[in-house]
Image (tube, grey):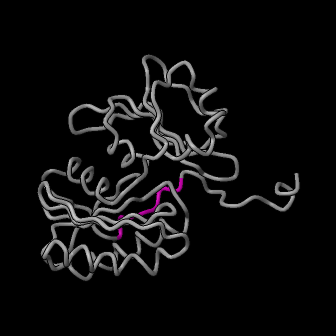
Amino acid sequence: MKILALDTSSEFCSAAVLVGAESHQLLERAGQRHSQLLIPMVERVLADAGLALSALDGIAVSVGPGTFTGLRIAASVAQGLAFGADLPVAGVGTLDAIAWSVDADAILVCTDARMGEVYFVAFTRADASLATHVAPCVRPPDAVPVPANGLWHGAGGGFAVHAAALTQRLRSVLSTVNAEARVEARHVASLARARHPDGFVEAPESLVPLYVRDKVALTTAERSS
């Protein structure tokens, strides 16, 4: 399969083309420049791979959770490209992609959700699949669910931003931590391919951001408290 993958869910922006075992990726700390960077990145990774958009088998996109604006940018660009080239799509959770990038069998993924909260999920990995043990949720770091049984590997920037609270909360189950682990387009592509080995089947309009949390800002009273 020849897959284009996009991610704009965090402060980073990335695009990748995966062909067999070979991947071509561009990744940059974007700040608020995702909309400016993404399409030029797509053009460059396609050129690096020597492929036209029409030669692809599908487009994979990280659908969240993440920044509200960022999730909409990737979904919109992917839909436009897919409609134009008549390509199917696949949505991949950002927390799933982070877990997929980690060499561990039991993974707690935690990313900063701002407003004093984190996005959190627990997966176990077997062969080419991830099994969910704690569903994606948003919680204060000192109130994340503590999974039962065994030792778990922590991954994601939430373990850097909220290190003390998370270490205290998860001390009975946490073994090692990779706070540098983040979602990248190449991992989105790899996981999408593993989940859809016979090809993507979803239409572009099926791409819907997974926000997990509906509330995006503190009220004036909350900010002053």
Which quadrant holds residue 79? bottom left
Does residue 83 sit above or below 64 in this rendering? Answer: below
* Near-viewer residue (168 or 56): 168
User: Is residue 36 found left or right of 24 in the rendered image?
Assistant: right
Residue 165, placed above or below residue 36: above
- Residue placed most toward the observer, 8 or 136: 8
Q: Nearer the viewer, residue 210 or 175?
A: 175
Place residue 214 in its image quadrant: bottom right
Determine whether, in the image, residue 168 is placed left or right of residue 119.
Answer: right
- Residue at the (45%, 16%) spot, across then down: 149
Q: Identify the image quadrant of the N terminus.
A: bottom left
Q: Residue 146: where, in percent of width, then height?
A: 55, 26
Q: Which residues are magenta?
A: 205-211
* Residue located 66% across and 33% down the image: 165
Asked whether residue 72 is drawn in magenta, I would say no
Left or right: residue 218 compared with residue 3: right
Q: Quadrant of residue 185?
A: bottom left
Please name the predominant secondary structure of the magenta segment in the image. Answer: loop
Q: Position of residue 6 (x, y in %)?
A: 34, 66
Residue 67 image offset from top left, x and y in percent: 55, 62
Left or right of 184 in this view: 179: right
Nearer-the-camera pick, 177 or 84: 177
Image point (25%, 83%), residue name = 84
Coordinates of residue 72 in the picture (x, y in percent): 48, 70
